[in-house]
Image: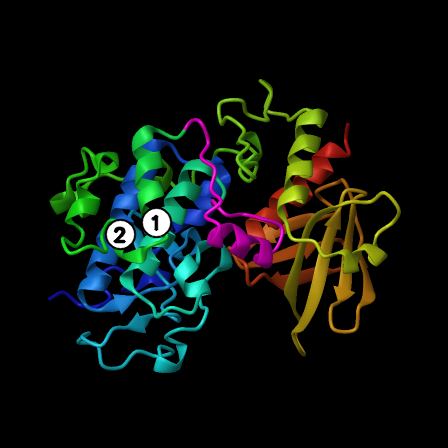
């Protein structure tokens, strides 16, 4: 049997290609051929993990790393649950006390976990279905304004498929998101055979998958293409409505129009969670574009801060424990006076001439912050 971490060995050192999530953000959504390849590699990984009796329990694009040659490795084993018959005897942070507790990420958690059922291999297969949906659409299938609403949609299995999904993709996702975990392809008595034989994976050479040339977007992750010239509607799918990738928000000269940018900003505002308690920090008629509880990293001590980006535009910092405004980050439409530097999906810096503020986003939306701020800056120029 190969080493347990055949798919994840040296992951942080060898994955110069970054996260699959970052690729989805930059591209908007993946083509079906691209998604098919990555989904197949995820299946390959999960089949191996399940064969050694491990349930990952936090499969999502942010935990899928791309190596420098474009193949996927899975990361973040902090939520792994070993089964009774696993040969793995010791695994940090995987205790029996967590067997029936909620772990993972809200948008990818299966309904049985919300009902406190014990973990099964079907948990990872549900997350695979959610991940495939996100690769093809740019958004998770149960995205909503709060975790509570996400959970309600999951329990109700409230899922809407974009019209451009192929019949094969729709059928596979529909089966992976079966409310009965034992009926999900890969969880039945025939193991992964039925999953690999699904028509969506037609043409996949499973025996030589790791030798297959990956999609171009992963082969050259540091391509010089200007990110601003790419589709900014990467999070535009919401509640069953979609924006066709072919109708980019970029005009022929590579500059987005005012109405297109404003439309994107309004969509960003509609998808993020917003509690009315934060309304007191806004001006009349002002709307939230993006809001997150972040960790502000300082030399002396790290502090939690609620960062609010509004359409005024403003960047408001609030102490979430005391509900007291801690001041604004000085806004400028000039990128030389206000810019966002992303270190990875969790860490980013907002830089102004007088101060550099470093943040950590547990929800791994650093690229989302960068994109939203830059879109607002462009919008103000019109």
> Is residue 195 toward the left or the right of residue 377 in the image?
left
| Position of residue 332 measured from the top left corner of the image (x, y, whole percent) | 78, 44
Figure quadrant of the N terminus: bottom left
Calculate the distance from the C-alpha at mark 1 to the C-alpha at mark 2.
Answer: 7 Å
- Residue 379 higher or lower than 59, as above or below: above
Judging depth in this view, the residue of 210 and 245 nearest the camera is 245
Of helix, strand and loop, which mostly describes the magenta segment?
Answer: loop
> Is residue 349 toward the left or the right of residue 132 in the image?
right
Mark 1: few/some/many CA within 10 Å (<14, 14-19, 20+):
some
- Bounds of the magenta segment: 141-164
Q: Which quadrant would residue 374 be assigned to in this image?
A: top right
Judging depth in this view, the residue of 77 and 118 nearest the camera is 118
Q: Which quadrant would residue 57 be assigned to in this image?
A: bottom left
Judging depth in this view, the residue of 118 and 264 nearest the camera is 118
Instruction: Identify the element where label 2 is drawn.
Output: helix
Q: Is residue 315 magenta?
A: no
- Residue 381 higher or lower than 22, as above or below: above
Residue at the disc numbered 1: 178
Residue at the disc numbered 2: 183
Q: Which mark is first along the chain, 2 or 1?
A: 1
- Residue 162 higher or lower than 268, as above or below: above
> Is residue 279 toward the left or the right of residue 373 in the image?
right
**Could you tell me if residue 34 is visible in this image?**
no
> Is residue 328 toward the left or the right of residue 272 in the image?
right
| Position of residue 197 measured from the top left corner of the image (x, y, whole percent) | 17, 40
Dot label at residue 226: none
What residue lies at 29% left-to-right and 51% top-to-bottom?
Answer: 42
What residue lies at 72% left-to-right and 38% top-to-bottom?
Answer: 377
């Amino acid at each position: 049997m190969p080493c347990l971490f055949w798919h994840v060995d040296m992951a942080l050192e060898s994955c110069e290609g970054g996260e699959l999530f970052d690729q989805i953000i930059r591209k908007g959504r993946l083509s079906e051929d691209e998604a098919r390849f990555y989904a197949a590699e995820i299946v390959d990984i999960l089949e191996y993990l399940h064969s050694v009796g491990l349930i990952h329990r936090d499969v999502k694009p942010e935990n899928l790393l791309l190596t420098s040659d474009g193949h996927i490795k899975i990361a973040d084993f902090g939520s792994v649950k070993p089964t009774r018959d696993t040969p793995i005897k010791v695994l940090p942070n995987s205790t029996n006390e967590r067997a029936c507790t909620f772990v993972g990420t809200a948008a990818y958690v299966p309904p049985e976990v919300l009902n406190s059922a014990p973990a099964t291999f079907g948990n990872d297969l549900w997350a695979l279905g959610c991940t495939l949906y996100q690769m093809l659409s740019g958004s998770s299938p149960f995205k909503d304004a709060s975790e509570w609403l996400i959970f309600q949609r999951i329990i109700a299995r409230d899922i809407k498929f974009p019209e451009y999904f192929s019949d094969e993709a729709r059928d596979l996702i529909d089966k992976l998101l079966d409310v009965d975990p034992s009926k999900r392809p890969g969880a039945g008595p025939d193991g992964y055979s039925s999953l690999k034989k699904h028509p969506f994976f037609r043409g996949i050479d499973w025996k030589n998958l790791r030798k297959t040339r990956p999609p171009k977007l992963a082969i050259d992750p540091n391509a010089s293409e200007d990110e601003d010239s790419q589709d900014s509607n990467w999070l535009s799918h919401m509640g069953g409505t979609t924006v066709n990738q072919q109708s980019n928000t970029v005009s022929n000269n590579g500059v987005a129009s005012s109405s297109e940018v404003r439309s994107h900003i309004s969509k960003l505002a509609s998808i993020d969670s917003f509690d009315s308690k934060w309304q007191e920090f806004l001006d009349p008629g002002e709307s939230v574009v993006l809001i997150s509880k972040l960790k502000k990293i300082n030399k002396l001590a790290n502090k939690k801060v609620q960062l609010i980006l509004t359409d005024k535009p403003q960047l408001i910092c609030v102490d979430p424990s005391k509900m007291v405004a801690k001041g604004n980050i000085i806004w400028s439409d000039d990128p030389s006076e206000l810019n966002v530097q992303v270190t990875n999906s969790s860490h980013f810096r907002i830089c102004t001439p007088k101060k550099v503020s470093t943040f950590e986003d547990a929800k791994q939306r650093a690229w989302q912050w960068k994109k939203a701020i830059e879109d607002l800056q462009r919008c103000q120029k019109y």
